[in-house]
């Protein structure tokens, strides 16, 4: 497996994974293009095929980052790819704190985040249409 920055030419595959993962809440092609150009957007490749991605955006001019989106192609799930994307993104982002929102019904993602050190700190009501979002964060301990 290889993890690299996403390129504009990757949008069609990323969009397919996005729609398979989020249906009505999926990013548009235009939004993905913006995030690939302006944010830390990484793709995981297995045998030269994009199998998943993660997008981090900065929060103001601090060392805080937000995971804007993370998704794995359904045929590659349950193989540790989400964990590897989180770790690689965390390392490349150089963040001191990472925030995210997750649909309260997405138990697989919630377990992944807890296993990777994220903790709940709040909720947004009706964030995903009829369902609430759990707000989570991870404080990165830097050892010098």
Image (cartoon, rainbow, N blue to C red):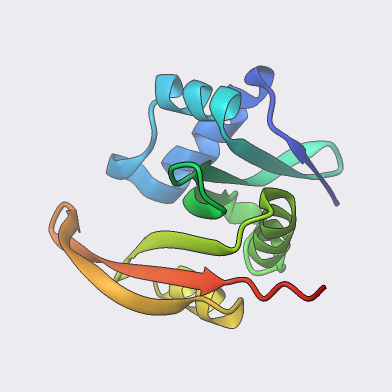
Residue nearest the observer in this picture, 67 or 17: 67
Residue nearest the observer in this picture, 136 or 33: 136
Specify the quadrant of the image occupied by residue 103. bottom left
Residue nearest the observer in this picture, 132 or 18: 132
Give the x, y percent position of residue 116.
61, 76
| Residue at left offset 18%, top offset 63% | 131
Specify the quadrant of the image occupied by residue 102. bottom left
Q: Is residue 106 left or right of residue 43?
A: left
| Vertical side of 15 occupied by 64: above or below | below
Q: Is residue 124 left or right of residue 83?
A: left
| Residue at left offset 45%, top offset 70% | 137
| Vertical side of 127 occupied by 7: above or below | above
Q: Is residue 57 left or right of residue 27?
A: right
Give the x, y percent position of residue 83.
67, 67
Residue nearest the observer in this picture, 98 or 60: 60
Quadrant (top left/top right/bottom left/bottom right) for the C terminus: bottom right
**Count the marks: how many?**
0
Give the x, y percent position of residue 80.
71, 68
| Residue at left offset 69%, top offset 54% | 94
| Residue at left offset 44%, top offset 22% | 29
| Vertical side of 31 occupied by 119: above or below | below
């Amino acid at each position: 497996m290889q993890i690299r920055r996403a390129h504009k030419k990757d949008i069609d595959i990323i969009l397919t994974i996005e729609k398979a993962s989020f249906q009505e809440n999926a990013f548009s092609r235009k939004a993905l293009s913006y995030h690939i150009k302006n944010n830390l957007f990484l793709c995981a490749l297995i045998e030269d095929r994009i199998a998943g991605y993660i997008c981090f955006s900065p929060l103001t001019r601090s060392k805080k980052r937000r995971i804007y989106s993370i998704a794995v192609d359904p045929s590659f799930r349950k193989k540790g790819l989400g964990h590897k994307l989180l770790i690689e993104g965390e390392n490349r982002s150089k963040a001191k704190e990472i925030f995210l929102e997750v649909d309260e019904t997405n138990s697989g993602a919630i377990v992944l985040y807890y296993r990777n050190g994220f903790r709940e700190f709040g909720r947004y009501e009706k964030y995903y249409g009829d369902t609430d979002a759990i707000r989570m964060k991870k404080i990165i301990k830097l050892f010098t």
